[in-house]
Structures are given as C-alpha cells and as structure tokens.
Image (cartoon, rainbow, N blue to C red):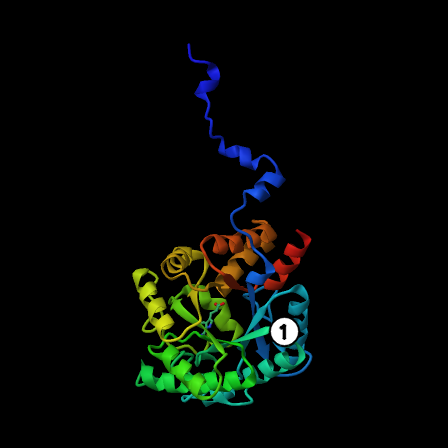
C-alpha cells in the first residue's frame, strides 16, 4: 500500500509564502521611490492652486507652489517631475507660437525648479495641444493634422525647453520623424546631454479625459486624435514605433496608457531591453481614486499593487500622479 504522504506534492509552492521573511526573500520585483516620475500641472499666478475635479487630490499649482512641490519631491527621494502647463485660452493660436516662447509658463516653471531644486530632473512635454486653438497635438490645415510642419514647430519647442534647463524631453505628439529631427536640433544647439523619453507607443485612449480637463484642452479639442495616436487594437505596431524612435535617437521609451497596456510594456522590454517607462494616466488615477473615495477598494494598497505590476511587466519606471503619496507609503513600509 502506498504511504498516505506520497499522495501529497513534494513541491509545495506555498512553503515560500509562510512568513513575511520568506515572502520577502522570494520576492521577484520591488517598487522603490527611484521608479517614480511625478506629473504636475502648472498655472499662472502666485501662491494659489486650483483643484481638478476629475482628479481628486491633484491641483494646478502656480510656479512658486510648484517649486515647493519640487522640494517635497526631493525630500521624498523622487527623481523626476514632469511639467504640464495650463495655458490661458487667449494664448492658444492656430500656429501655436506660444509653445516655443522662451518665457512661456512651462519654461519659466522649468527654470524655477532647476534653480531652486537642481537635484530634481525636469521632464517637459513636447506637443502643441496646450497651445493649439483646436486642441490637437499638431498644426491643423484644412482639417488635417500636418506632419512635417508640426515637426518643425516641435523642434523649436524642444530647443526652448532644453534652453530653459529641461533634463528630459517627452515628445508626446506622435508625429513621424520628430525624434530624429529633435535629436539633430539638440546636437546642433550644443545640448548633447539632454535626454529624450519618447512617447513611442501612445494610444488614442479614452483614459486621457481628466488630463484634458487639467490642461484646459477638452473644450478646445475638435474631433479625436486617431490619425496620429495608435489604435488600441495594435501591438506589433508598437514595436515598430519603438524601433523607429530608438534608431532616431531616443534614450528612453514610453508606453501610454499604463495598466490596460502591460502586454505592450512586456513586449517592448523583452524585445529591445532598453529603458522602458509607462504612464499611469489621468483616467487610471481617476478610477482608483474614485473607487477608493467611495470605500469600494483600499486605495493605498491598490496604488502600490498597480505600480508593482508595471515593474513585473518590465518597466524601469512609471509616470504616476500617485508619486508623492506612494513615496510616503514606501517610507512607512
Ligand atoms: C498631450 C498629452 C496628453 C497626455 C500627456 N500628454 C493628452 C493627450 O494626448 O490628449 C495624457 C496624460 C494623462 O492622461 O494623464 N500631448
């Protein structure tokens, strides 16, 4: 007769879960403050802020308060912040010229942060939407978003941002040829060490809704962004985008949105092995905060779990509005 124990498995996977110590030893991935990039919204004025209704806990800040936020980020150990400006409607035009104004809001914010808190890496968004009278990321002619003319404008914008002291340029426009053109422009202007984190695989997503409220673009946007942002049905195409952007001189690549696109993150990291980032976008933030505020989920645990999932998928870092909250939670853990 077979001894009764033989009926039981020699491999008991639960053994490694029996205590906190063993679970930590067997842990494969970790989330640390070094993984976080904090996206922030800046507006004109002094000593003021405006809460964004669809993003509970997030406000647009005036530059002085943004600098305070940068100090807070530095003290928490967050390596980078990404600036998004709220541009007054009267500055939005057809040619988007405010985008490359030396002293536009975004460039003043960059200078203020770099002067007061040089340890923080400043990332800026290279796309025309906050400055565009029709809310698009590119210049519109006869209802068409024109590629090459937009790229010319984006180079001017990128150079003005580099001049202001940006450490990381984040082209989020999805035009063709922008990375190569931008890289050449930076080299020629002597900005060899300014890095580019390309929004390489950026999808035409409904998850950006709250962000467009935050930067005041939702009212302006005519139509949708499907002729330049990617179709959510596609995955091979993301790899083509990443390959192209790397060959044109991107230092880091990004997948956006985040949580519903972890399969893309995983394929990108496995295929290219390059610094890969994900953007946990405004709609993802709003869903988690909305449910947490209703008591339907444990918000803090969901934040940490969602960010750890990006690490598991192979991401080197995450842009997340939760950055300061999570940095504090990680200090307590
Ligand atoms: C604009 C830009 C968008 C986001 C970042 N840069 C919006 C868009 O493409 O319409 C979205 C970020 C978020 O939803 O948190 N080029």
- Under circle 1, the secondary element is loop
| Residue 266 image point, x, y percent | 40, 56
Write the residue at 38% across / 56% down.
270
Q: What number of labels is visible?
A: 1
Q: Residues within 10 Å of mark 1 (few under 14, many from 20)?
A: some
- Quarter of the view holding residue 35: bottom right
| Residue 73 image point, x, y percent | 64, 68
Let me know if residue 225 appears in the view: no
Left or right of residue 122: residue 332? right
Q: Nearer the viewer, residue 95 or 51?
A: 95
Left or right of residue 229: residue 332? right
Left or right of residue 194: residue 331? right
Single out the residue that lies furthest toward the top: 1
Let me know if residue 32 appears in the view: yes
| Residue 198 image point, x, y percent | 43, 72
Task: Please tell me whether residue 43 is drawn above or below residue 69 in the rendered image.
Answer: below
Write the residue at 56% across / 89% down.
103
Q: Nearer the viewer, residue 76 or 284?
A: 76
| Residue 226 image point, x, y percent | 33, 71
Disc 1 target residue: 119
Q: Nearer the viewer, residue 100 or 118?
A: 118
- Quarter of the view holding residue 254: bottom left
- Quarter of the view holding residue 77: bottom right
Write the residue at 59% across / 63% down.
323
Q: Quadrant of the N terminus?
A: top left
Q: Is ligand 1 less than 8 Å from the beta carbon at label 1?
A: no
């Amino acid at each position: 007769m077979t001894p009764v124990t033989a009926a039981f498995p020699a491999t008991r996977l639960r053994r490694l879960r029996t205590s906190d110590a063993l679970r930590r030893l067997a842990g494969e991935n970790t989330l640390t403050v070094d993984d976080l990039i904090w996206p922030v919204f800046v507006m004109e004025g002094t000593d003021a802020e405006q809460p964004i209704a669809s993003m509970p806990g997030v406000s647009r800040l005036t530059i002085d308060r943004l600098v305070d936020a940068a100090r807070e980020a530095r003290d928490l150990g967050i390596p980078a912040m990404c600036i998004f400006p709220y541009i007054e409607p009267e500055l939005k035009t057809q040619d988007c010229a405010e985008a490359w104004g030396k002293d536009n809001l975004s460039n003043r914010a960059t200078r203020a942060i770099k002067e007061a808190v040089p340890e923080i890496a400043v990332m800026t968004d290279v796309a025309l939407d906050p400055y565009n009278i029709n809310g698009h990321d590119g210049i519109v002619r006869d209802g068409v978003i024109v590629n090459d003319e937009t790229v010319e404008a984006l180079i001017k914008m990128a150079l003005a941002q580099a001049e202001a002291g940006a450490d990381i340029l984040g082209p989020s426009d999805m035009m063709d040829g922008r990375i190569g053109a931008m890289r050449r422009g930076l080299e020629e202007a002597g900005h060899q060490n300014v890095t580019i984190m390309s929004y390489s695989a950026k999808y035409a997503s409904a998850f950006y809704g709250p962000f467009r409220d935050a930067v005041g673009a939702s009212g302006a946007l005519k139509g949708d962004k499907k002729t330049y942002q990617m179709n959510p049905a596609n995955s091979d195409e993301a790899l083509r985008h990443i390959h192209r952007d790397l060959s044109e001189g991107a230092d880091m690549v990004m997948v956006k949105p985040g949580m519903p696109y972890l399969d893309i993150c995983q394929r990108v990291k496995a295929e290219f092995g390059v610094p890969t980032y994900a953007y946990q976008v405004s709609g993802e933030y709003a869903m988690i905060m909305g449910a947490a505020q209703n008591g339907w989920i444990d918000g803090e645990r969901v934040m940490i779990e969602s960010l750890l999932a990006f690490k598991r998928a192979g991401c080197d870092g995450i842009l997340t509005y939760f950055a300061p909250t999570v940095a504090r939670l990680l200090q307590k853990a």
